[in-house]
Image (cartoon, rainbow, N blue to C red):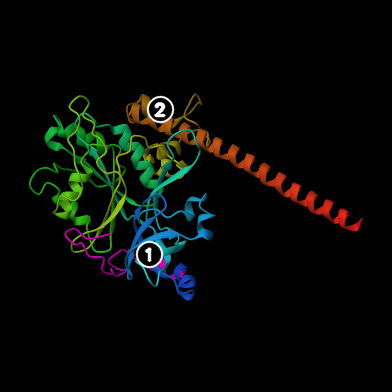
Amino acid sequence: MTRPGDDSTSPVDLDTLGWHVDFAGPFQTYAAQGLRPARVAVAHNYLYQVTGPDGELMAEVSGRLRHKGDIPENTPVVGDWVAIKPSQSEQKATIEAVLPRRTSFSRKAAGETTRRQLIAANIDTIFLVCGLDDDFNVRRIERYLVAIQESGASAVIVLNKADACPDLEAARTATAAVATGAPMHLISCLEDDGIAPLKIYVTPGHTIALIGSSGVGKSTIINQLLGVDRQRTRTVRPKDGRGRHTTTQRELIVMPGGGLLIDTPGMRELQLWDSAKALDDAFDDIDGLAADCRFRDCAHGEEPGCAVRAAVDAGQLARLRFENYKGLKQEGAQLQQRRDELARIEEQRRTKTVHRTMRSMRNNRLTDKT
């Protein structure tokens, strides 16, 4: 990872990279083994670009860690802190362990597989960037806010392309209704100093990630924050207002004067992973109304005495927000069912393997006796 305008691979101190006291304890074991701390800046297929006190290194995961790679916690992602063993002769290293994450943004992997896909780790603030053009979608904002709540990071809603919005006040009001307390900024990133409101979040050692659909202006915002045209940008398609991916990989960037940015490719699909509590927190208005339902386990369907449905009928709760909440709730329940079923199948497979091993050992003992 290089700083904007700097092609060197000089060492970077831990505080600049966002080192936190929470990592010190877990790292003590690895320090005793002579390992060094580093942060993952770029993740390729099987190689990782890491940076830290030993400079910028290309790294591979160790064989021991690779065998645990089916567990997301053991697979490094951008933003991770890792314990590395630097090579004595080359600008290379081996990743021996991934330190416990303070926060992690993830989603269900696209497609039919029931697998968690980690996007980035150890993020302090997530800029949820939305375009105020034809792609503006409040329901999508709600979905992203649930995922951010689940991640453990703080959300900041960035409504970009204010110059393309025919009714800014309506967009502001609609977004505020679902923001659940998250700060919101309306900007035009192409204007001179249009991203000024976002600069207050860029502080030394603070990690910011930008997420959102393609074409909402994430790369342009990063270029403005950096003061250089580092990220490639494209105009959106006039036909539907949507953009093509200009960021093709996740990357951790050290800001001039402090702060760190993680850019992410635009997401065509964001399926939630473990959203039960995060959903209640993101829809805390509905959760609060549910406390007055007649039945504690009210599903807000046809049950009598449902305070949530009553609020919808009275116009106190937007029907579209309620319908989106129910849809996300059902999506989470269906995913949990699939996960439980896969866990049951895996347990059966593991039990059969153990029984086969025990039978084989017993048969071998009998054979030895004869």
Mark 2 surroundings: few (<14), some (14-19) or many (≥20) residues within 10 A: some
**What is the x, y in percent for residue 219?**
21, 45
Q: Quadrant of the C terminus?
A: bottom right
Task: Calculate the distance from the C-alpha at mark 1 to the C-alpha at mark 2.
Answer: 62 Å
Residue type for callout 1:
Lys
Q: Quadrant of the N terminus?
A: bottom left
Q: Residue furthest right?
A: 370
Foreground pick, 40 / 120: 40
Foreground pick, 148 / 243: 243
Q: Which residues fall within the magenta stretch? A: 1-25
Q: Which mark identifies residue 310? A: 2
Tell whether position 125 is magenta: no
The residue carrying mark 1 is 92
Corner quadrant of residue 212:
top left
Foreground pick, 141 / 133: 133
Q: Is residue 296 above or below residue 62?
A: above
Corner quadrant of residue 367:
bottom right
306 displayed left or right of 360: left
